[in-house]
Amino acid sequence: MVLEKTGRPLVEREVAKPEPGPGEVLVKVSACGVCRTDLHVVDGELPEPKLPLIPGHEIVGRVEALGEGAEEGTGRLKPGMRVGIPWLGWTCGECDFCRSGRENLCDRARFTGYTIDGGYAEWTVADARFCFPLPERGGLEDVAAAPLLCAGLIGYRTLRKAGDARRMGFYGFGAAAHLAAQVARFEGREVYAFTRPGDREAQAFARRFGAAWVGGSDETPPRPLDAALIFAPVGALVPAALRVLRKGGAVVCGGIHMSDIPGFPYDHLWGERSICSVANLTRRDGEEFLALAPTIPVRTETVALPLEAANEALDRLRSGRLTGAAVLVPDF
Ligand SMILES: [Zn+2]
Ligand SMILES: [Zn+2]
């Protein structure tokens, strides 16, 4: 499924099966999650995507072939292995960011399904060093594993940015929040879920995943919070979240794109409250989260759709008509 021009629906195309270049692996895609970032790419809200582009960066599949030198990258990938391919597709390895454990900030980074082709396809190629081996056992089917590759990883990084906060607000209880909330609960934190006002379905969903309190984003929880994680792309939620934070609390914005943040009185930030964003992920986030997920164990709520239904999946995500994460399956 190919994006030929932003702002237009994807089109189904027959394209040549990709060949793995040096250091790359060819992967037969079995499932690819649909992330809100895909929507931002398709809608033209992120600058300069590769065009034409195959979107998708929550890829689960099996290694079919290795390019020259691919086994040297990590020494761990072999044909037949189940792997996950995330958003971070390549980094330079040389810049200050890369050399200080912050490869997520690399200026030259390339991103799966944005600046390199992704997983809305039957096959894809990826740099072997950026693929995660996925366990064969542990009961996690390919479809269930797909959302871990971005919603899970970004949710995890967002959660980590909130430090040791105990009472955590989650604004926008979708794919990333429902995964991060399970980690939060496992770590003994309290989950306060904020949804669109009156969205009973999302509120029931949040309760199923252990929220101690649910309400609309315009409501005030019974106690001030230590941190607020914002997963909805709505800038107005930033001042709304600041108002329910106690002193020293942090607002962490987990999305790659957000509407403008409206002005607010300094008083809401005063008291050493902070606002920060989360950009991309590091391979270390992936290794930590994918090791932690089966011990919790993290459950994912998914809606599987055939690959050809990519536009329908994107439309449902755009209009909020999805509970959990949409996952595209080539062999539906
Ligand atoms: Zn770099
Ligand atoms: Zn994503």
Image: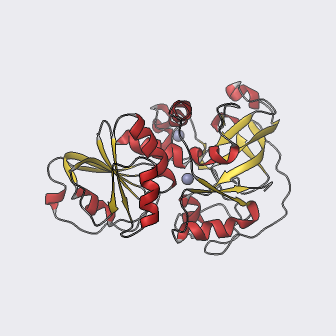
Q: Position of residue 151 (x, y in %)?
A: 53, 49
| In the image: residue 153, left or right of residue 81 | left
What is the total number of numbered labels drawn onto the structure image? 0
Q: Is residue 237 above or below residue 249?
A: below
| In the image: residue 172, left or right of residue 118 | left
> Which residue: 41% across, 60% down?
203
Q: Residue furthest bottom?
A: 8
> Which residue: 44% across, 58% down?
204
In the depicted view, which residue is nearer to us: 320 or 44?
A: 320
Quadrant the N terminus occupies: bottom right
| In the image: residue 129, left or right of residue 97 | right
Can residue 22 be seen here? The reply is yes
Q: Is residue 295 above or below residue 36?
A: above
Quadrant the C terminus occupies: bottom right
Q: How is the image coloured?
A: secondary structure
Can residue 255 be seen here? The reply is no
Q: Position of residue 246 (x, y in %)?
A: 19, 49
**Which corner quadrant of the image does residue 326 belong to?**
bottom right
| In the image: residue 241, left or right of residue 94 | left
Q: Position of residue 227 (x, y in %)?
A: 29, 47
Q: Position of residue 139 (x, y in %)?
A: 66, 36
